């Protein structure tokens, strides 16, 4: 698939078939996402692939802050990709001071770039994804046992789509850009 087509046709998918994604495909998606740019090439994003039904159920029941749409999406997913970020690296100088007034918020910027790159790579392979942002990062981290010094940055529900969702309305370019 050409890049423009991939960008224009990727949608948030919330309904998946029961078909499992092969581990080799997951490895390929993570490899492609590893090409995402990051603050001073710090590459702080890590990926934890969840396919155990019990773990998915716990995340749905305990980790999504009661947000019903995410609970429903996760409970129906057969696999999740949890993106974590290594803390205390991105946005910092070697002496521990912040480089800019954005301080450590560059971490989430880098995680967002990696998440979208992962989702575009998945879409190119016929895999649907939705990036979920409403969750309890500490609880999800506890459920999956993330390493010390990392924080859950995003949950991506994923699988082969039951159907291709319609494109929601987009803002016009004139609404989005200002030329000065």
Image (cartoon, rainbow, N blue to C red):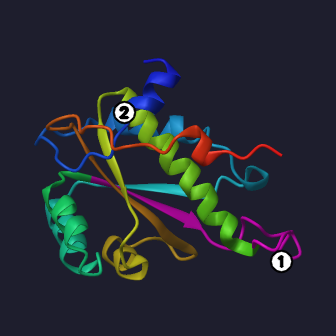
Badge 1: residue crowd in 10 Å (few <14, some 14–19, many ≥20):
few
Secondary structure mostly seen in magenta is: loop
Which residue is painted at 21% across and 66% down in the image? 69
Residue 123, numbered circle: 2
Classify the position of the N terminus by image quarter: top left
Judge by depth and name the residue closer to the eye, 72 or 52.
Answer: 72
Residue 103 position (above or below residue 26): below
| Residue 155 spot, x, y in % from top left | 37, 61
- Locate residue 23: give its quadrant: top left
Chain-order first, disc 2 or disc 1: 1
How far apart are the alpha carbons under marks 2 and 1? 38 Å
Residue stretch in magenta? 80-102
Which residue is painted at 25% across and 75% down in the image? 67
Farthest residue toward the right?
Answer: 95
Judge by depth and name the residue closer to the eye, 11 or 160.
Answer: 11
Which residue is painted at 44% across and 33% down in the image? 121
Residue highlighted by disc 1: 96
Farthest residue toward the front?
Answer: 174
């Amino acid at each position: 698939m050409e890049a423009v087509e991939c960008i224009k046709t990727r949608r948030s998918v919330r309904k998946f078939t029961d078909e499992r994604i092969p581990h080799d495909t997951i490895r390929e998606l993570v490899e492609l996402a590893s090409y995402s740019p990051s603050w001073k090439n710090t590459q702080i994003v890590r990926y934890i692939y969840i396919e155990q039904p019990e773990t998915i159920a716990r995340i749905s029941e305990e980790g999504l802050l009661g947000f019903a749409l995410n609970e429903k999406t996760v409970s129906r997913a057969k696999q999740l990709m949890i993106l974590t970020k290594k803390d205390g690296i991105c946005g910092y100088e070697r002496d521990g001071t912040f480089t800019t007034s954005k301080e450590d918020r560059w971490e989430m910027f880098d995680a967002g770039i990696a998440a979208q790159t992962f989702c575009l790579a998945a879409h190119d392979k016929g895999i649907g994804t939705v990036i979920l942002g409403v969750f309890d990062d500490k609880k999800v981290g506890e459920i999956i046992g993330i390493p010390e010094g990392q924080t859950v940055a995003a949950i991506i529900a994923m699988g082969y789509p039951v159907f291709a969702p319609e494109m929601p309305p987009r803002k016009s370019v004139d609404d989005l850009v200002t030329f000065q």
